[in-house]
Image (tube, helix red, strand yellow):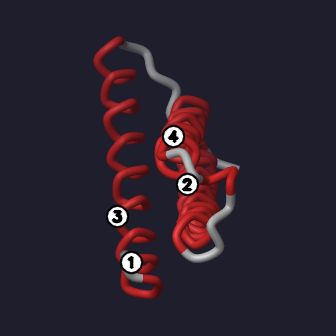
Amino acid sequence: MSTSSQTFSRRGLAIVWLATVFLIYGALGFILYRGRFISSWLSSESDLVTFALPFFCAVAANFGILYFWFRPHTFARTLGQIAISFVLAALAWWVYMVCAVNTYGE
């Protein structure tokens, strides 16, 4: 296997993992939103549990994937990966909130 195909393979796998985190975070957020506003779960009464904790877990998972597959060699690259992690989590949050609010209201 050549070096370029290994690099493509690693990046392709990273994209699959990032998409998996996106889907899991979206599903978890949707379920917690439903539990809070429709089912009135006691465990999801807190904004921290319903919104913040899943968001920061998604940021950490995204950063872990980016850090592992696109190993940074500089401080600036690490900051860029953190920024990309926040953007990906914010995009997932926006998508699941649009779906949840349109489905359940509030």
Tell me the SS state at disc 3: helix
For the residues labelled 3 and 4, the Cα–Cα distance comes to 17 Å
Name the kind of residue labelled 2 in the image: Leu
Residue in the foreground of this view, choosing between 44 and 86:
44
Name the kind of residue labelled 1 in the image: Val
Discs 3, 2 touching: Cβ within 8 Å: no
Left or right: 93, with 38 as reference point: left
Tell me the SS state at disc 4: helix
Discs 1, 4 touching: Cβ within 8 Å: no
Upstream in sequence: badge 1 or badge 2: 2
Upstream in sequence: badge 3 or badge 2: 2
Discs 3, 4 touching: Cβ within 8 Å: no
Upstream in sequence: badge 2 or badge 4: 2
Picture residue at 32% right of the left edge, 47% below the top: 87
Please name the residue that numbered disc 2 is placed on: 18
Q: Position of residue 84 (x, y in %)?
A: 35, 41
Crowd rating for badge 2 (residues with CA inside 10 Å; few <14, some 14–19, many 20+) = many
Name the kind of residue labelled 3 in the image: Trp
Please name the residue that numbered disc 4 is placed on: 48
Discs 1, 3 touching: Cβ within 8 Å: no
Name the kind of residue labelled 4 in the image: Leu
Tell me the SS state at disc 1: helix
Kindly report which numbered mark, 3 or 4, lies closer to the viewer in this rendering: 4
Q: Which circle marks residue 94 in the picture? A: 3
Picture residue at 60% right of the left edge, 62% below the top: 32
Discs 1, 2 touching: Cβ within 8 Å: no
Q: Residue furthest bottom?
A: 103
